Amino acid sequence: MFEYIGWVVLAVLTLLAVKVFKDLNSSGVTVDENIPDVLEIQDFTPKTLAKYNGTDDKRILVAVRGKVYDVSGGKKYYGPDGPYAFMAGHDASRALAKHSFGNENLTPLDEPIDTLEGLNEEEWAALNQWIEFFASKYTFCGNLVNP
Ligand code: HEM
């Protein structure tokens, strides 16, 4: 009898573990145990943000329209081998608005933060959707400011 209950408990725990694992994966967020959970909310300049590129620092941060998000959970996208690695440690606003790959829409680190002048209506609409996307999926960890 007790042996039977033991098996039932084991089965339930296994099912729960599978569900938690699937939930984590379905949002594309993975947990990297090498990265401490908490990063104090702080201001970042383009230069202080830059090290959070998944290589110099394991944590990966991306700025969108002045707000910095911890996207470490999306390592498969922004990590060194991911398709969006170019955004890691950078202000990705203009690249996201224009849906462009590569560095041509990233502001050089020693220049002031992009004011996003010149974006057309469609690009602003795209950017606003990305702003919502990042805010809902990732943890906010500070503002991007000029030095
Ligand atoms: C060749 C064209 C592209 C294809 C086929 C593509 C495909 C995808 C796919 C399949 C996803 C995952 C969606 C999901 O998990 O539900 C994704 C996510 C994403 N894509 Fe693209 N993409 C392309 C171009 C771009 C470009 C040009 C940008 C921006 C400059 C971009 C930015 C993103 C971002 C930020 C995400 C979200 C990743 C996350 O979950 O954090 N993509 N894309």
Image (cartoon, rainbow, N blue to C red):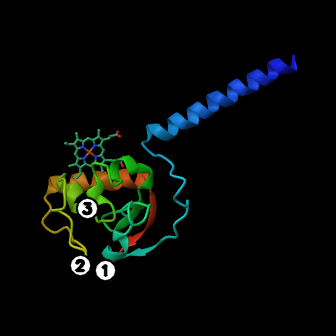
Q: Which picture quadrant has residue 98?
A: bottom left
With 85 as the anchor, is 97 left or right in this view? left
With 123 as the anchor, is 82 left or right in this view? right
Q: Amino acid at mark 3?
A: Ser
Question: Of callouts 2 and 1, which one flags the residue occurring earlier in the amino acid sequence?
Answer: 2
Q: Amino acid at mark 2?
A: Pro
Q: Which picture quadrant has residue 104?
A: bottom left
Which residue occupies 51% across, 34% down?
A: 22
Please state which of residues 34 and 45 is positioned toward the viewer in this rendering: 34
Residue of label 1: 146
Which residue occupies 69% across, 24% down?
A: 11
Which residue occupies 17% across, 62% down?
A: 105
Q: Residues within 10 Å of mark 1 (few under 14, many from 20)?
A: some
Q: Is residue 78 above or below residue 38?
A: above
Q: Which picture quadrant has residue 89?
A: bottom left
* C-beta proximity under 8 Å, tags 2 and 1: yes
* Image-quarter location of ligand 1: top left
Please state which of residues 132 and 140 is positioned toward the viewer in this rendering: 140
Between the C-alphas of marks 2 and 3, the distance is 14 Å
Question: Of callouts 3 and 1, which one flags the residue occurring earlier in the amino acid sequence?
Answer: 3
Element carrying mark 2: loop
* Quarter containing the N terminus: top right
Q: Amino acid at mark 1?
A: Asn
Element carrying mark 1: loop
Residue of label 2: 112
Q: Residues within 10 Å of mark 3 (few under 14, many from 20)?
A: many
Residue occupying the far bottom of the picture: 147
Between the C-alphas of marks 3 and 1, the distance is 15 Å
Residue occupying the far right of the picture: 1
